[in-house]
Amino acid sequence: MALTKDDLLKAYRLMRTIREFEERVHVEFAAGEIEGFVHLYAGEEACAVGVMLHLTKADRIASTHRGHGHCIAKGVDVPAMMAEIYGRATGSCRGKGGSMHIADLDAGMMGANGIVGGGPPLICGAALAAKVQGTRDVGVAFIGDGASNQGTTFESMNLATVWNLPAIFVAENNGYAEATAADYAIGAGSLADRAEGFGMPAATVDGHDFFAVHEAAGEAIRRARSGDGPSFIECQVNRYYGHYEGDAQTYRPPGEAEAARANHDCLDKFAGRVTASAGIEREELDDIDRAVAALIDGAVSSAKADPAPAAAEYLTDVYVDY
Amino acid sequence: MARTITMLQAINEALDQEMARDSSVIVMGEDVVGGSGAEGEMDAWGGPLGVTKGLYAKYGDRLLDTPITESAFIGAAVGAAASGLRPVAELMFSDFVGVCFDQIYNQAAKFRYMFGGRAETPVVVRTMYGAGLRAAAQHSQSPYSIFTHVPGLKCVMPVTPYDAKGLLIQAIRDNDPVIFFEHKGLYETEGEVPEQSYSIPFGEANVVREGNDVSIISLGLMVHRSLEAAETLAGEGIQCEVVDLRTTSPLDEDTVLESAENTGRVVVVDEAPPRCSIATDISALVAQHAFDALEAPITLVTAPHTPVPFAGVLEDQYMPDAARIAAAVRRVAGYAQ
C-alpha cells in the first residue's frame, strides 16, 4: 500500500496520540490520580500504528497488558479510554475493566488482556469467523516477548496454519517479560525462526521504524486477505517505562531507556524522514502535536470530572440473561 | 411426534436442527468429523463416540476437526463467539479442562463484565464427564462444580434424552457461555423425544418423583440411581421426592427449598468428590434458607475425596449407588430429634 500524505499525517497523529496519552498517564499515576495496574506503551508506537494503518474497523485485534497503544491505533475513543483508566462510568467498559481490559468490539478491539498469551486463541476465532462468513477481514494477535513463550501462542500459530486462517501474529519484543530478559527466556535465538517452524512466513523488523513495520504488516495482511494464511512479524523495540508504573527497573542497565529515546525514538525517526522526503512541513507536525495535547488534556479533565459508576453496577453485566 | 431414541441421538439431532436453522452455528473439536486428512471414510468417527456422526455430510466445513490443542480451539471458539458465530466446541473429556481453563475462566466468562456489558459470547462447550467406564483418574471426573463456581458461565447436565435435546438447543441459542456436561454412562439411555425442535429453559429443576418423606436432590447420572433407590424405599413405606437440578448455574433454588420445606429431610447425591462441591452448595443453601423446616441433618452421598480409581472393585465403591443412597435416606427418614 503506497502511503499518501494523508496516511502519513494520520500515522503521525496516532503515534503522537499514543505517546501523549502514555506520558500523561505516567504523570497522573505518579501523582496518585490513577489506581491499579498500568502498563505503558511509550516507545512502541510504530508497532501498533504500522500494523493498524492497514486495518479496517471490521478487522479484529487482540492485545496485551500493554494495550493502550493498540486501542488508540485501532480507533477506540480516546476520552472513553482515559475515563476507563480513571474507573469512570463514562469509560470504554463503564469502569468495570480498567487499563488491562479496555475493549471495544465495535471497533474490532477484542480487549487488552491480563493473561499473558490470552489473545492468540481468540484471534484464531475471529479469523475463523471471518473465514466462515466469507468476509476478507483479518485478525491480528499482538503479543509480547513474554507471551511468545506461552503454549497458547504456539498452539494458536499451529492452528492458524492447519485451518489456513487470515491471522497475523505480531510479537512486540521489548527485551523484557516483566523483569526477565528476552535473551534469557527465549530458548530459540529467533522468534521468526520459531514461527517458520509452524509453517508461516516470518519477518523481523525494527519496531521503532514505522515504515519497516508498515511494509511487513502490509505483506502479511495482503496474504491473509487473499486466503494465503497466517504470518508472523517480530518487532524489536524498546519500552520507555517499566513493566508496570512504579517499576524501579533495576534489571535494566542504567541509561537504556534514555538511550533508546535519544537514538531510536519512533516519532523522531518518522518526523525526520517525512519532513526530509515526503513533502511534509515540520509545522504540520507541530499542529498535530498541539491538537493531540489538547485532546489528551481534555480527556484527562473530563475523566477527572466524570462520575464513578453507580454503586449497584457491581452486580450487573455478568450475564446477558440469568 | 415423539419416538424413543438414545441420548446420543438426541444430542446429534439438536446439533443437526440448530445447524440447519442457523448458519452461524459451527462445531469444532477433536475428531468431531474424524478422519480429516486421512483417506478412509468421509466422517470416519463423527466424534469419539459418534455423537456428531453424519453432520459433516450435511454441513461440510462448518464441522472442523482440530488438532489436539484444547487451549487454541476452545479459545478460538470463544473468539469466534465474540465475533458473530455460535460455536459448539467439544472438549472431549471434561478432565481435559486443565489445559484450556484460562480461555473459559478468564476470557469467555469475564468478557461481558470486564467490557461493561458490551460483549456477548454465545459459545457452547460440550464435554463428557463421569465415572463408571473404567476410564480411570484422567477420563472419569465430574468437575462441574469448578465451572459452576465461575460467574459468567452457565452449567447444564441433562439426565434424559428429552432434556438433552431441549437443553442443548437452549444452550446454542443462549447468548452466554454454556458448559454442557454429557455423562458418558448416559449416551445409550433411551427416552421419548419429539422430532420437532424445542428448548428447555435453564434454571428450572425437574421434580422427577414426588414424595413427602425425604427429598433427594441430585444431578446427572445420580438422578437415575436416586430414582432406583426411591423405588426400593417406596416398598418400605418411605416416599422420596427426587429433584433433578438440570442446571447448576443458574440454580433453581426455589424448587430445592420448596422440596426441603415439604419433607424437612434432605439427602444430596452427587457423583463428584465432596469438598467445595454441588453437594455442599445445596447443603449450604438448604441450611441457610430452610433451616426451620429441617427435621434431620442434611446428608450428603458423594464420591470420596480421592481421584477416580481404575479397577472395577475400586471404581464401583467410588461411585454412589442405589444401595448407598437408600441407606442414607433410611437414616434420615428415621432420624428423631
Image (tube, coloured by chain):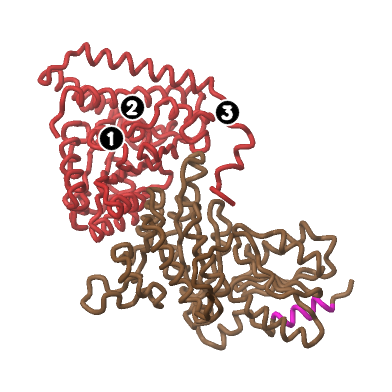
- The amino acid sitting under disc 2 is Ile
Left or right of A232 on screen, residue B143: right
Outermost residue on the right side: it is B337
Residue B309 seen from this side = no
Give the magenta-colored segment's residue range: B325-334
Q: Residues within 10 Å of mark 2 (few under 14, many from 20)?
A: many
Task: Specify the colour of chain A.
Answer: red
- The amino acid sitting under disc 3 is Ala
Chain coloured brown in the rendered structure = B
Q: Give the residue at mark 3.
A: A308
Q: Residues within 10 Å of mark 1 (few under 14, many from 20)?
A: many
Q: Nearer the viewer, mark 3 or mark 2?
A: 3
Left or right of B168 on screen, residue A156: left
| Circle 1: element type | helix
Query: Along the polypeptide, which appears first: circle 3 or circle 2?
Result: 2
Residue B80 vs residue A206, the one in the foreground: B80
Check if mark 1's residue and mark 2's residue have beta carbons within 8 Å. yes
Q: Give the residue at mark 1.
A: A48
Q: Give the residue at mark 2.
A: A18
| Circle 3: element type | loop
Tell me the subunit letter for badge 1.
A
Outermost residue on the top side: it is A283
Query: Along the polypeptide, which appears first: circle 1 or circle 3?
Result: 1
Quadrant position of residue B24: bottom left
Distance, label 1 to label 2, CA atoms, is: 10 Å
Location of residue B116 with respect to A269 vertically, above or below: below
